[in-house]
């Protein structure tokens, strides 16, 4: 291996070790957004100089390690809980307050055979107070009387789940966690089908099960290390454009997918708003502004409904979009004009395809609605609510808002934002901040577990893999633009 390639491989390995370290200690953050793409690019550069057989083995090893670290990152995802681990005879308890002034509260820390109680002076909001308590080593729970004060001890999610599962019926936990995974997988299938339809609207057709859905699963797996849906969007765009050789068309489909996705989420918020209004009342009371509940509900209705109506109008009548963009196109240089014209032509491809657009909207609505339902099942799984439909609509409505916040969050896989908004919106519904946080995190685990085996597709997918068919404008492509395809020269007759 040439020295530049060897140095690239060593640097790539070092960056991957950094990602592994961050995953193990639950510290994946903004740095990971830079480290991961750089790690991949350096690896691809190093691999180029290898012969075919070593290249295959190195690729397999890299994918295997990435898959293992991806699962590691999921299990060690840190969340705030009321669980306290005492090590070396001292408990370091972290608590935070939402109150504007200092408070005196009674704190209890207990296990099956140990219990301690003490009075604390807690500083006002936007600060974390740490209390040291001498206790025998073991696992404890923290209980605080005031609703405005909560424990903020962070534990890896696998440990929090193991500790909570002992307090609920194990069969109930397993059943409803499994149901949450199933319904999330249905949502992923629905989202993949929406992407499949949008490509079809651009006259790009490929197998749904073996190409579109597997690309979605691989993209979700890679997204474990990246914010929002960056990993999913990047990989599905890469694979569709790679095998169709239609970057502009695929790009238009991807942009429209994002607009339709948000619209599907907003439609869900509008539909569930009348049933989940009490969640808004709970939040308004928590903010000490109960009179603002109706204003907040109206704002949600106007914003969500307005955006949904605008996007649907633009999809049904794309000529409105084209009439606005064509005059602007003429202001750009000739080369840019051609690209813009290709883009607007690709948008116009959906004109008259009302059935396809409607099916895409329904598929995206089901995607987000089923994700919100997942949190209802996880709440039952941890015993936060009883097995009944009483809290179904409030939890689904609150979870829809939480999903929007998670999508817009720049944090890795929505870490922190998901738990914070679940606690803000559904603390009262779920019996406290720890239960709300855990139900949100368990929803994340259920979602990832339902699609984590996308890593297996990625692990086994060879560079020579091709979809069974890719039709562009009704014609099968020949893949001649791919570097690893040998094009036979015509023989003289």
Image (tube, helix red, strand yellow):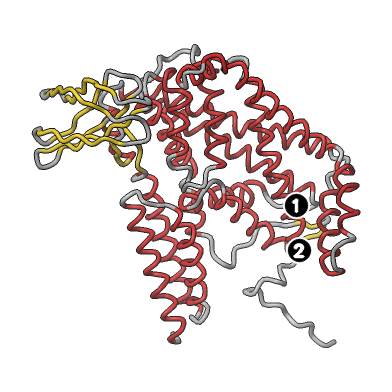
| Of callouts 2 and 1, the N-terminal one | 1
170 left or right of 273?
left
Tag 1 secondary structure: helix
Residue 477 is labelled as 2
Q: Do we see residue 173 in this rendering?
A: no
| Dot 2 alpha-carbon crowd within 10 angstroms: few under 14, some 14 to 19, many 20 or more | some
Query: Dividing the image into 4 quarters, which one contains the N terminus?
Result: bottom left
Q: Are marks 2 and 1 in contact (CB under 8 Å)?
A: no
Front residue of this view, candidates 200 and 427: 427
* Label 2 residue SS: loop
How far apart are labels 2 and 1 at the CA level?
A: 20 Å
Measuring 35% from the left and 22% from the top, which residue is drawn there? Answer: 148
Q: Quadrant of residue 110?
A: top left
Q: Is residue 227 left or right of residue 103?
A: right
Q: Where 399 sits versus 32, above or below?
A: above
Disc 2 versus disc 1: nearer the observer: 1
Residue at point 89%, 44% (across, down): 319
Task: Please give the label number shown on residue 252.
Answer: 1
Does 215 sit above or below residue 271?
Answer: below
Q: As rendered, which of 79 and 477 lies closer to the eye?
A: 79
């Amino acid at each position: 291996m040439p020295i530049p390639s060897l140095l690239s491989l060593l640097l790539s390995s070092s960056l991957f070790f950094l990602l592994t370290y961050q995953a193990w200690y639950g510290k994946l953050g903004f740095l990971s957004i830079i480290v991961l793409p750089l790690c991949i690019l350096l690896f691809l550069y190093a691999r180029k100089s290898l012969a075919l057989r070593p290249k295959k083995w190195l690729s397999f090893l890299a994918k295997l390690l990435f898959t293992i670290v991806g699962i590691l990152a999921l299990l060690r995802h840190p969340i705030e809980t009321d669980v306290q681990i005492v090590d070396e005879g001292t408990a370091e308890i972290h608590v935070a307050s939402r109150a504007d002034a200092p408070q005196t509260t009674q704190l209890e820390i207990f296990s099956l055979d140990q219990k301690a109680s003490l009075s604390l002076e807690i500083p006002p909001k936007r600060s974390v107070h740490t209390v040291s308590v001498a206790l025998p080593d073991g696992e404890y729970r923290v209980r605080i009387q005031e609703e405005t004060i909560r424990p903020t001890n962070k534990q890896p999610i696998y440990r929090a789940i193991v500790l909570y599962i002992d307090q609920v019926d194990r069969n109930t936990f397993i059943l409803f966690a499994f149901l949450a995974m199933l319904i999330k997988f249905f949502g992923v299938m629905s989202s993949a089908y929406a992407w499949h339809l949008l490509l079809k609207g651009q006259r790009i057709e490929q197998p749904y099960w073996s190409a579109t859905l597997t690309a979605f699963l691989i993209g979700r797996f890679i997204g474990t290390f990246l914010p929002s849906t960056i990993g999913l969007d990047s990989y599905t765009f890469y694979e569709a454009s790679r095998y169709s050789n239609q970057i502009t068309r695929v790009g238009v489909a991807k942009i429209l997918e994002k607009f339709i996705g948000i619209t599907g989420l907003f439609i869900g918020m509008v539909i569930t708003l009348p049933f989940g209004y009490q969640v808004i009342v709970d939040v308004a009371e928590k903010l000490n502004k109960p009179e603002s509940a109706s204003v907040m509900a109206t704002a949600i209705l106007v914003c969500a409904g307005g955006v949904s109506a605008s996007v649907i109008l633009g999809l049904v009548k794309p000529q409105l979009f084209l009439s606005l963009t064509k005059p602007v196109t003429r202001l750009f240089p000739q080369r840019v004009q051609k690209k813009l014209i290709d883009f607007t032509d690709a948008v116009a491809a959906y004109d008259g395809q009302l059935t396809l657009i409607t099916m895409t909207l329904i598929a995206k609505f089901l995607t987000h609605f089923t994700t919100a339902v997942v949190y209802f099942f996880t709440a039952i799984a941890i015993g936060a609510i009883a097995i009944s439909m009483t809290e179904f609509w409030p939890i689904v409505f609150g979870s829809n808002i939480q999903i929007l916040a998670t999508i817009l969050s720049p944090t890795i896989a929505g870490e922190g934002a998901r738990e914070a908004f679940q606690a803000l919106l559904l603390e009262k519904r779920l019996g406290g901040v720890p239960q709300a946080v855990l139900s949100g995190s368990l929803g994340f685990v259920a979602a990832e577990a339902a699609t984590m085996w996308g890593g297996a597709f990625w692990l086994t997918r060879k560079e020579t893999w091709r979809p069974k068919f890719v039709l562009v404008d009704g014609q099968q492509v020949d893949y001649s633009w791919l570097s690893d395809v040998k094009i036979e020269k015509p023989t003289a007759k």
